[in-house]
Image (spheres, rainbow, N blue to C red):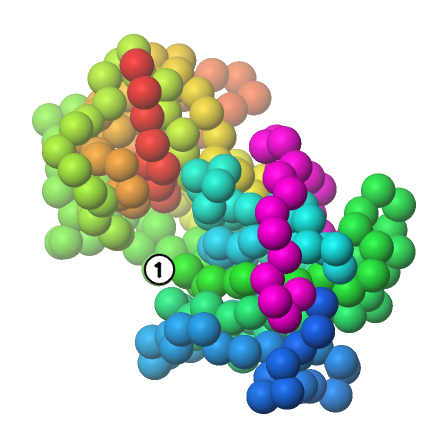
Amino acid sequence: MRLLPLLCLPAALMIQAAPADQGVPPADATRTPSGLAYQVIHAGREGSRPGLKDFVRVHFTGRDAEGKTFADTRADGEALCLSMERIMPGMRESLTTMTIGERRQLWIPEPLAFAGAKGRPAGAVVMDLELLEILPPPSQAPADVAAPGPDAQVLRSGVAFKILRPGTGQAHPTRASWVSVHYTGWTTDGKLFDTSIPKGASVSLQLKDTIEGWVEGLQLMVAGERRRFWIPEKRAYRGQAGMPAGMLVFDVELVGFHN
């Protein structure tokens, strides 16, 4: 097993001083039968743990046996969404016992890391791993996919929405803005037709080039916010050949934007 290809992060490799315990778990680290060792840096909240079919949003820093940093999501400025089925075995094993908000230092032996994959760090790796969010697989449509419920707001255009997670700040994108988003789209019978989640990192696009329902709805959002939109066909693909028909439902997270 290996990390998602997207974990070949675009930022240049950084070389940092190795921590004192680099590569060697301290005596008080918890050890599992597989050979994984870890220490809890920050306890998480009470709640559920990721299942093998879930996606997780995580921050992590990874160092090889020599202390060289090969990945750092905080330095790159964005947490990643990863499939539990596709991440390295050592990360997956640890995440199945973590709750949201928990942060751990992991010592992952080579068989549970890159397992000698060409072009990947050799030997054991050390990771600082934080679980930010547990996401259901995109194929799992929300319970209210068929129609907006009483908790949704409806705009004059017929676009309806509800806020799933508030964002921060007061600035909003404009039609001309470039937006970074995570999104998933379903038809009202619950069929998935598009999603950015398996890509790991957010998708960047110019808002004016998207469907009218997005242009209208995303201008109401702030960075970090997630909304569910019900977009009537006249504000979506207007019966365009080869595109999904009828009202469409989108979960959209506005990761960030710039003009």
Residue at x-position 76% and y-position 80%:
35
Q: Which of 122 and 101 is in front in this view?
A: 122
Q: Where is residue 26 in the image (x, y as percent from the top left)?
A: 63, 81
Q: What stretch is highlighted in magenta?
A: 1-22
Number of numbered discs visible in the structure rendering:
1
**Residue 191 in view:** no
Q: Residues within 10 Å of mark 1 (few under 14, many from 20)?
A: few
Taking the spot 16% from the left edge, 47% from the top edge, the residue there is 152
Question: To which quarter of the image does residue 133 belong?
Answer: bottom left
- According to the picture, the residue beneath numbered tag 1 turns out to be 143
Position of residue 224 measured from the top left corner of the image (x, y, whole percent) = 29, 42
Q: At 75% from the left edge and 55% from the top edge, which residue is drawn?
A: 66
Q: Which of 95 and 229 lies nearest the eye of the viewer?
A: 95
171 with respect to 116 (left or right):
left
Picture coordinates of residue 9, whole percent (x, y)? 62, 37
Residue 2 falls within the magenta-colored stretch: yes
What predominant SS class does the magenta segment belong to? loop
Query: Is 196 above or below relative to 147?
Result: above
Element type at marker 1?
loop
Q: Does the magenta stretch include residue 137?
A: no
Measured from the top left, where is residue 151 in percent x and y? 14, 53
Left or right for 153, reference 202: left
* In this view, 171 is above or below 193: above
Could you tell me if residue 153 is visible in this image?
Answer: yes
> What residue type is disc 1 on?
Ala
Q: Quadrant of residue 92?
A: bottom right
In what quadrant of the picture does the C terminus appear?
A: top left
Q: In which quarter of the image is the N terminus?
A: bottom right
Q: Is residue 93 depicted above or below 254 in this figure? A: below
- The residue located at (38%, 56%) in the rendering is 142
Is 191 or 22 nearer to us in this picture? 22
